[in-house]
Image (cartoon, grey):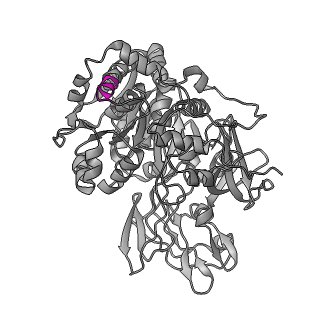
Amino acid sequence: MRSAKATDATPGAHSLVSSHRRGRTASWVPDTPRIGEGLEDEGTRGDLRWGTIPALLADSVERRGDAEALVDLSGEAPVRLSFAELADRVEGVARGVIAAGIGPGDRVAIWAPNCWEWVVALLGLQSAGAVLVPLNTRYKGIEAADILARSGARMLFTVEGFLGNDYVTMLSEAAPGVAEAIETVVVMRGVGTTGERTRSMAEFVEAGGEVPDEVLEERRSGVEPYDTSDLLFTSGTTGAPKGVIQTHAASLRAFADWADIVGLRADDRYLVINPFFHTFGYKAGILAGLMTGCTLVPLPTFDVGRAAEVIVAEGISMIPGPPTLYQTLLNDPGFDPAAVDTLRLAVTGAAAVPVPLVEAMRDTLGFETVITAYGLTESCGIVTACRAEDDAETISRTSGRAFPGVEVMVVDESSREVPRGTPGEIVVRGYNVMQGYFEDPEQTAEAIDPEGWLHTGDVGTMDERGYVVITDRLKDMFIVGGFNAYPAEIESLLVRHPGGGSRRGCGGARRTHGRGAPRLLGPCRGRRGGPRRHRGLGEGQHGQLQGPEDRRTGRCPAPQRERQGAPLRVARESGSRVTVSGGAVTRIGSNARSLKWRSVER
């Protein structure tokens, strides 16, 4: 059997870190190839076709020109941009970035919801050779300040008024020193806080108007494929956010293959609900849109009523998201699937996808293709995916097989490959594995072993075809009466119960068996009554779980955010009693026990 462990130091880790400590995310190529030798399928090689994201934008203009690239319905008036118009606005921002003194490799943050300005700011800063640092719109001021400080971001693009937030004021009040260190703050939308370093988007673009064409072109053409494209902070498995370093080349190769595998086309109209600040919204959304020439229709938040309106009005054909998104559409009495005849493509993951849900997505919502996939930020968002020709059972039960150019293996605690069908940790090796964690060689060495295998911390199995089933997180396993119990396995059984919709399981302390497995259930479409809790399964279903039964009323914490293709990680302990209503978790009681949350975002 193969081993995913060796004794040497992680290749390139020290040179990677030292380049950052000199103040720049310089190009870095691993000392040893990351791609496993002998892999037959290299994929579409988007890295060789485009090389860099600025070059991808230029190519999309040549191919699609006046075709509609972006539709933003979130403002006072709809904004519709062709590929040529998008590129013009990107040039304006790129000139502004250069005029502000931002150099190649400097970090620039975006703290905003999905909107056309986000896309323009991203492509503009990358055209100037800068590195993206996206910030979660749910961050409080102190959380954003931590990432801004640790990334060394010199510029911030933001908005005012989203969900009632004044991000500039939040940052200034939480961390005045960090706010002072940001040299330029660009308020892209809303009436922003005024200040010496704060300006509107129009003022920012105007200030860059004097940057000569040759300077812009020199900066744009100076971007190299192995330059850092983005620094995405993720909690991973340790709780403290760490900056994941990725390159232009890896991102282009990964999502050219992703777009090819899922079947995204130029005539698709793509509803982007996944946030741009996340790997999936940014790369499977913005980058895949430029690659295929389809039309992106971003939403700032997911509201089922608004989504339904946009699906009908804009003729949406592509909707990616976790299974709960489609279940919410199916459960919503205000959404009439009969009024929609354009839906074609769904890409899902992040949890078990029951066969009945796959069938309902096809039969009721009208999707021609439903594909499940698995990925994490440290692997550039991609690891495995089902293929369009796979049967419903495979799509439901697995997360697919490896992407081209990517190796996937299941290993034991000694990092040795286990037999097919045996649970173990999923490890990944290939071009898609991150360059490392920003200025954190210790965590990098812990995540990537000397042979280049990324240890995901996800538990799963692999069948004889190479298809992977994600079972759970290593650290979410709990023991009941000597048996290993995985919340996702329990949830997979619960999801087939007729009494509920969305389910979540977690471990709870037990005096007799160590830990129990309380359950949380939600209502199904068309079933009588509102939110409810369920006190037990049928006799046959209880027998399908290892270990002692627990028929008590479910107690479980509100689920955290999901990540693509992996099970939710939930609180290890909670005294809160919760229920589900319309996809939202409502806490209805609690005791004095504190919540111990486990972060999910990856």
Q: Position of residue 165 (x, y in %)?
A: 24, 50
Q: Residue furthest bottom?
A: 512
Q: Position of residue 531 (x, y in %)?
A: 40, 66
Q: Nearer the viewer, residue 153 or 62?
A: 153
Q: Which residues are magenta?
A: 94-101
Q: Residue at x 52, y 31 (%)?
A: 227
Say if 77 sits above or below 323 in the image: above
Q: Nearer the viewer, residue 151 or 14?
A: 14
Say if 152 sits above or below 600 in the image: above
Left/right placement of residue 13 relative to residue 156 reads right
Give the main secondary structure of the magenta stretch.
helix
Say if 487 sits above or below 160 in the image: below
Q: Nearer the viewer, residue 355 or 560?
A: 560
Left/right placement of residue 290 relative to residue 491 reads left
Q: Position of residue 307 (x, y in %)?
A: 37, 42
Q: Residue at x 65, y 41 (%)?
A: 386
